[in-house]
Amino acid sequence: MKKLIFALAMIMAMSTSVFAAGNEPSVYLNGNQMTFDVNPFIQDGRTLVPMRAIFEAVGATVGWDQDTRTVYAVREKNDDTSLVTLQIDHDKAFVNSEEKTLDVTATIKNDRTFVPLRFVVEALGEKVEWNQERYAVIITTE
């Protein structure tokens, strides 16, 4: 009986670690799955994605100020210019000089700057949805 309990415990432990290792959310932009050089992850219920990849995918120009550890993105769309500014590990961000409070901060992981996907995409005027069944973020810009 002890051997059976031990075997079941080992199977459960292995299946849990496999599930956790492959538990990154997928991101779709206008129906196409995005790929990233470093996987997105969920922190405090929010999806974080590599900064440059997401900003450039929605047509923004990306900048980085090493001295202040600040990322910014500028995008022009329909004669409207949007500027989004986030500082690493700070809970305040700016959208066209209007201060916003973040649920989760921009952070650096695996030598990449990660930003909260919903915040940055909505700040640029696009739509974002979470699809629990697909464990995916759906971004629509059209």
Image (tube, helix red, strand yellow):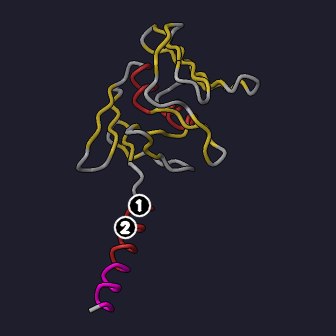
Residue 3 against residue 17 in the figure, above or below: below
Q: Secondary structure at mark 1?
A: helix
- The residue positioned 66% from the left and 45% from the top of the image is 111
Q: Dot 1 corresponds to which residue? A: 20
Tell me the number on the disc at residue 16: 2
**C-beta proximity under 8 Å, tags 2 and 1:** yes
Where residue 38 sits in the image (x, y, percent)?
Answer: 56, 50
Going by the numbered disc 1, the residue's amino acid type is Ala
Q: Nearer the viewer, residue 85 or 141?
A: 85
- Quarter holding residue 103: top left
The quarter of the rendered structure image containing the C terminus is: top left
Give the residue displayed 42% in from the left and 11% down from the top.
Answer: 78
Horizontal and vertical percent for residue 132?
Answer: 25, 46
The residue that appears at 60% across and 45% down in the rendered structure is 109
Is residue 4 in the magenta section? yes
Residue 99 lies in magenta, yes or no? no
Q: Which residues are magenta?
A: 2-10
**What's the CA distance linking mark 2 and mark 1?**
6 Å
Question: What amino acid is found at the position of numbered circle 2 in the picture?
Answer: Thr
Q: Residues within 10 Å of mark 1 (few under 14, many from 20)?
A: few
Q: Residue at x 51, y 9 (%)?
A: 96
Quarter of the image with the N terminus in it:
bottom left
The residue nearer to you, when weighing 95 against 109, is: 109
User: Residue 55's x, y, as percent?
Assistant: 52, 30
- Reply above or below: 78 against 117: above
